[in-house]
Amino acid sequence: MLRHLMMTATVATLVATGASAETLRYATSRDVYGLDPHATTDSFTNIFTHHIYEPLVRYDADMKVEPALATSWEVIDPTRVRFKLREGVTFQGGETFGADDVQVSLMRAADLKSPLRGNLPGLKAVEIVDDLTVDLILEGPTPLLNNYLTNIFVMDKGWLETHNSVAPIDASQGEEGYTTNNANGTGPFALESRRPDALNVLVVNDGWWDTPQHNLTRIEHTPIGSDATRVAALLSGEIDLIEPAPLQDANRIDGSDGVHMLQNPGLRSIMMGINMGDSLIDGNVEGNPLKDLRVRQAMYHAINMDLIRDRIMRGKSRVTGSLIAPAVKGYSDAMDERLAYDPVIPPESKGLRK
């Protein structure tokens, strides 16, 4: 893996200033893979389902972990962490939230057949202490446990059992079930209707335990695959917000009356991975030249990252030397330095780290 070759692209989001204060008409380049929060690791799908479902802990606006469905946690020993659950929470179907829901949800996500199991490594079991207390049993010390849990959403056990959906499904393999097009969470919005590849409608959950940070009562999400059509829908006022904003249209959109483009640094790094195996998957040479440090150094210096940033990304990215974005815990300024593009001078004189 060539850690130095990567870019962190900004997220371009567009909001029409004349939008209704209650209904948000939202368009994206594609639909979600479904509404089952354990059926895929796709980032966009998980972001969308987070409107409906909630984890034990979540990130705040500053990327710090804070309580959500759990109010506190305690390390009992290196392989046992106890979570106290929030009292008075109900699912959108009216069911009471409790320890059995956490147990079935976390074990469903960690099941060997679940595509999400890699997002919760080391979980062996969930033991119920009482109705509002659970112990997570781990294979060993897991300092990033709460970070993992921010992406593991809790479902209602009884609802899953009623609809024969306790077993996980894998959306990447084309599997579907009742949970694909139906939902029952504890989050700020509830599913009103879903028409795959056409329209997803969410309505505000008036019984949500937390305080809303918005004035919305309804979200209408429309997948629009064509960049041109999506932009036209925004500029005509048919849509209030689109994501992503096509890079080639960003300046034109930003200069349009009644439209404002919001930009912020993203957390995703675009990178090139290197095959370090004994042979190339496709190739007509013996062995694997990429195992030679000098070859990797030559590739590093021969790629003009500034040109990629300026031409391909149209200035909407940042050249970085680190896989970790500045907002993520563990980021280091010292690791974010990248050596300059220089295809002429031998890399040995540059002091490149191995």
Image (cartoon, helix red, strand yellow):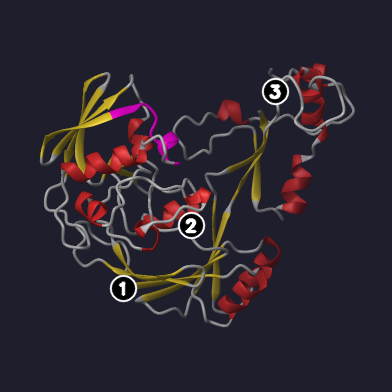
Which residue lies at the image location 18% right of the left edge and 42% below the top edge?
100
Amino acid at the residue labelled 2:
Tyr
State which mark lies toward you, 2 or 1.
2
Label 3 sits on residue: 276
Point out the image quarter for the N terminus: top right
- Sort mark 1 into few (<14), some (14-19) or many (20+) by Cα contacts within 10 Å: some
Amino acid at the residue labelled 1:
Thr
Is residue 1 depicted above or below 353 in this figure?
Answer: below
- Sort mark 3 into few (<14), some (14-19) or many (20+) by Cα contacts within 10 Å: few
Label 1 sits on residue: 217
Local SS, label 1? loop
Q: Position of residue 82 (x, y in %)?
A: 19, 30
- Whichever of callouts 2 and 3 sits on the residue coming sooner in the sequence is 2
Which residue lies at the image location 30% right of the left edge and 46% below the top edge?
55
Label 2 sits on residue: 33
Structural distance between the alpha carbons of marks 3 and 1: 51 Å
- Whichever of callouts 2 and 1 sits on the residue coming sooner in the sequence is 2
Q: Nearer the viewer, residue 161 or 200?
A: 161
Which residue lies at the image location 56% right of the left edge and 30% below the top edge?
333
Q: Position of residue 197 (x, y in %)?
A: 51, 68
Q: Nearer the viewer, residue 109 or 213?
A: 109
State which mark lies toward you, 3 or 1.
3
Magenta span? 115-124
Q: Is residue 56 visible?
A: no
* 114 sits to left or right of 207: right
Q: Position of residue 211 (x, y in %)?
A: 23, 59
Q: Give the image quarter of residue 121.
A: top left
Is residue 107 depicted above or below 221 in this figure?
Answer: above
- Check residue 174 for magenta coloring: no
Question: Disc 3 vs disc 1: Cβ atoms closer than 8 Å?
Answer: no
Q: Position of residue 108 (x, y in %)?
A: 32, 41
Local SS, label 3? loop
